[in-house]
Image (cartoon, helix red, strand yellow):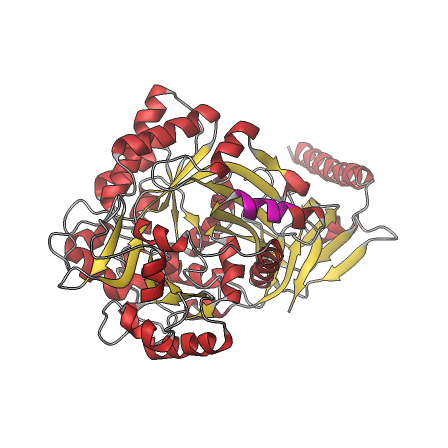
C-alpha cells in the first residue's frame, strides 16, 4: 500500500514537472510588454485575481502568475513592475453622450450652479458677442435652487436682450430660452403643445421660456451647426475626459451621421483611440431620420479601426425625464396632479420604428424613464419579437428608472437589458419621491430587485448629464449615498449592488450590452489589453473612499494612453 502511494506521488510530481516543461517550451512567442507584481482583478467568470499579464499587439496573451509571465519576456520585451498596485479591466461607460461632453466645453457651463451665477455667465458671454449671435449653455437644475421653480425668459432678457439664448437643463430634456429665441422658433401663446413635449406657460397662457422635450425643436433646429473643426475639437476633448477617468470603452447613446463621420475621420488619423459603440439617433417625431435611413441602407459597422468603432444599434426616445416632469407615468405625478408626463410616440409609431429596426437586423435601445414609457417599450419589443423572433436580441431600455414589480419581472423573462446610471439615484433622491410618492419609489432605481430577478445591469453615467467619473457611479451603486455621504447608510439601502456587481456593471455587463464580451470586459488571454491601474484596492478599501479612487495609468490595446 505504502509502495503504491509513493509511486502515485512520484508520477504526479513527474507529470507536473513535465507539464511545466511543456508549457515553458510552448511559450515561443515573446510579449511586447509584461506587467509583474500586480493585484489584478480579472473580472472573469470566477472574479479571480492574478499577479501578472503578458501583452502582444492589442491583446493579452497571458494572465496569471509571475513565474509563467516571465517566460514571455524576450530581449525586446518591456517589463513593468506594478509594485502591488491594483489593476482592473478598462471601464466601459454603457451610456454617455460622447459628442456633447466635448461640445459642452465650448458653451456656457451652468452645471448645477445657482441661477444668479448662470445669469452672470450669460451676461458676460453677451458682452463678447455681436447682437444676433447665439448664446448656448447647459447644466441648470431648478431643483437645486431655493424656490425649486422653473426659470423665465424675462430673467434671460434682462442679461442678454440682443442675443438668442438657449440653455439646456442638466437632464437634456428642457431648455430655458429668452424672448428672441422664442420669436425665432415662432412660439407664441397660440402654439399648441407637440406630441411628446410641452411649452411651459404662465397663468395667461403665455410661454414662460421653458420648453420641454419635443417643444424645443422649433427653436433648437434654428441653431447654426458647429463646424467640422469644432466638432472634432470637442470629440478629442471628450476622449481626454474618458481616458483620464479610466474609461477605455463607451456606448454613445445616440449620434447623427455628421458626428459619426467626424469620429471616423479622427480614427483614420489615429487621433481617436477610445472604443466607441455608437447608437444611431432616429429622426424627430415618428420619422426615420436621415442618419438611420443611411445606415439601414448601408448596414452596420462592426469592429472598425481595430475594434475601436461599432455602429449596430438604433436609439429611440420614449419619454422625457423625471426632473422636467416629462417622464411618462401610468399614474399622475404626486407633485403635479392631472399630469402624467409625455410619450414621444404613439404605440403604433413606436411599433413601426422597432419593427423596421428588426427587419434591418439592428439592436434596439429605447430611452424610457417612467413606468408608462417602460410598459410601452416592453409591450412593443414583445410584440415585434413574437412576430419575428430573435434568440439573442439584447434589446435595451436606457435608464429604466421608475419601474414596477411586473416590469422588472418581464424584462428578465424577455431578455431585455436595463441600462441604468447609478449616480442618477443619488442626484435625483431629493426630488424623486416628491414626483412619484412613497409607493412607486420602492421600485425606482431598484438595482437589487432588477439583479435578483435575473437581469444584468449595464452601468453608465449619462455624461454630461452627470460627471464622467465612473468611480462616482461605482460608489453610488455600492453605497446609495451622494458624494457628501448623504443619507448615512444609503437611500433605500436595500437596493445596493455588491462591489463585484458594481464592477461588472461597468466592465463585462456593459460589454455584453454591445455584443462585445468575447473581446473585452475582463482580463483574459485572447482579449483586448484594456486595463487601468488605480491608486487603491477597490474591493477592499473603505466604501467612502470608492468615489475618490484615482486612475494612475490607462492602457488601451496595450498602449499607455493616459498617465497621472
The residue nearer to you, when weighing 461 against 71, is: 461
Seen in the picture, residue 546 relative to 115 is either above or below; the reply is above
Asked if the magenta segment contains residue 262, the reply would be yes
255 with respect to 320 (left or right)? right
- Residue 435 falls in image quadrant: bottom left
322 with respect to 7 (left or right)? left
Q: Position of residue 434 (x, y in %)?
A: 18, 62
The residue nearer to you, when weighing 398 against 265, is: 265
In the image as oriented, which residue stretches furthest toward the right? 75
Q: Position of residue 389 (x, y in %)?
A: 39, 21
Asked if the magenta segment contains residue 392, the reply would be no
Q: Position of residue 379 (x, y in %)?
A: 27, 32
Residue under the point 27% across and 42% down: 373
The span shown in magenta is 257-264
In the image as oriented, which residue stretches furthest toward the top? 387
The residue nearer to you, when weighing 159 against 409, is: 159
Q: Main secondary structure of the magenta part?
A: helix
Amino acid at each position: 500500500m505504502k509502495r503504491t502511494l509513493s509511486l502515485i506521488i512520484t508520477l504526479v510530481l513527474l507529470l507536473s514537472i513535465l507539464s511545466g516543461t511543456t508549457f515553458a517550451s510552448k511559450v515561443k512567442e515573446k510579449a511586447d510588454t509584461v506587467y509583474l507584481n500586480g493585484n489584478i482583478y480579472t473580472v472573469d467568470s470566477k472574479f479571480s485575481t492574478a499577479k501578472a499579464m503578458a501583452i502582444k499587439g492589442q491583446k493579452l496573451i497571458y494572465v496569471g502568475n509571475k513565474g509563467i509571465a516571465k517566460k514571455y519576456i524576450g530581449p525586446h520585451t518591456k517589463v513593468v513592475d506594478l509594485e502591488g498596485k491594483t489593476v482592473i479591466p478598462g471601464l466601459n461607460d454603457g451610456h454617455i453622450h460622447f459628442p456633447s461632453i466635448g461640445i459642452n466645453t465650448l458653451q456656457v457651463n451652468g452645471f448645477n450652479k445657482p441661477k444668479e451665477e448662470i445669469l452672470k455667465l450669460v451676461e458676460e458671454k453677451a458682452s463678447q458677442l455681436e447682437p444676433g449671435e447665439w448664446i448656448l449653455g447647459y447644466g441648470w437644475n431648478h431643483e437645486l435652487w431655493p424656490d425649486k421653480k422653473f426659470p423665465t425668459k424675462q430673467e434671460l432678457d434682462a442679461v442678454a436682450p440682443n442675443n438668442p439664448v438657449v440653455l439646456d437643463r442638466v437632464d437634456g430634456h428642457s431648455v430655458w430660452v429668452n424672448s428672441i429665441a422664442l420669436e425665432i422658433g415662432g412660439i407664441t401663446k397660440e402654439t399648441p403643445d407637440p406630441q411628446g413635449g410641452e411649452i411651459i406657460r404662465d397663468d395667461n397662457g403665455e410661454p414662460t421660456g421653458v420648453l420641454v422635450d419635443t417643444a424645443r425643436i422649433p427653436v433648437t433646429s434654428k441653431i447654426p451647426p458647429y463646424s467640422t473643426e469644432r466638432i472634432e475639437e470637442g470629440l478629442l476633448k471628450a476622449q481626454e475626459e474618458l481616458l483620464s477617468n479610466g474609461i477605455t470603452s463607451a456606448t454613445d447613446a445616440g449620434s447623427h451621421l455628421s458626428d459619426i463621420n467626424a469620429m471616423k475621420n479622427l480614427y483614420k488619423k489615429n487621433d481617436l483611440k477610445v472604443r466607441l459603440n455608437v447608437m444611431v439617433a432616429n429622426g424627430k417625431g415618428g420619422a426615420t431620420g436621415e442618419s438611420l435611413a443611411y445606415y439601414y441602407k448601408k448596414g452596420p459597422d462592426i469592429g472598425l479601426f481595430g475594434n475601436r468603432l461599432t455602429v449596430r444599434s438604433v436609439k429611440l426616445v420614449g419619454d422625457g425625464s423625471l426632473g422636467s416632469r416629462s417622464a411618462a407615468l401610468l399614474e399622475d405625478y404626486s407633485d403635479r396632479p392631472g399630469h402624467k408626463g409625455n410619450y414621444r410616440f404613439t404605440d403604433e409609431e413606436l411599433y413601426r420604428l422597432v419593427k423596421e429596426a428588426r427587419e434591418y437586423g439592428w439592436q434596439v435601445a429605447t430611452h424610457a424613464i417612467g413606468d408608462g414609457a417602460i410598459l410601452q417599450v416592453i409591450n412593443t419589443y414583445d410584440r415585434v419579437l413574437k412576430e419575428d423572433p430573435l434568440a439573442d436580441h439584447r434589446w435595451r431600455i436606457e435608464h429604466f428608472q421608475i419601474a414596477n414589480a411586473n416590469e422588472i419581472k418581464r424584462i428578465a423573462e424577455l431578455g431585455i437589458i436595463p441600462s441604468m446610471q447609478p449616480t442618477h439615484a443619488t442626484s435625483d433622491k431629493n426630488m424623486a419621491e416628491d414626483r412619484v410618492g412613497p409607493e412607486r419609489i420602492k421600485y425606482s432605481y431598484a438595482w437589487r430587485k432588477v439583479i435578483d430577478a435575473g437581469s444584468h445591469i449595464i452601468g453608465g453615467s449619462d455624461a454630461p448629464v452627470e460627471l464622467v467619473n465612473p468611480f462616482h457611479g461605482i460608489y453610488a451603486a455600492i453605497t446609495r449615498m451622494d458624494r457628501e455621504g448623504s443619507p448615512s447608510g444609503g437611500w433605500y439601502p436595500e437596493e445596493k449592488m455588491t462591489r463585484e456587481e458594481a464592477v461588472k456593471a461597468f466592465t463585462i455587463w456593459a460589454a455584453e450590452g454591445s455584443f462585445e464580451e468575447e473581446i473585452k470586459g475582463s482580463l483574459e488571454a485572447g482579449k483586448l489589453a484594456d486595463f487601468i491601474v488605480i491608486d487603491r484596492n477597490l474591493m477592499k478599501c473603505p466604501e467612502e473612499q470608492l468615489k475618490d479612487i484615482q486612475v494612475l495609468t490607462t492602457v488601451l490595446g496595450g498602449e499607455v494612453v493616459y498617465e497621472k
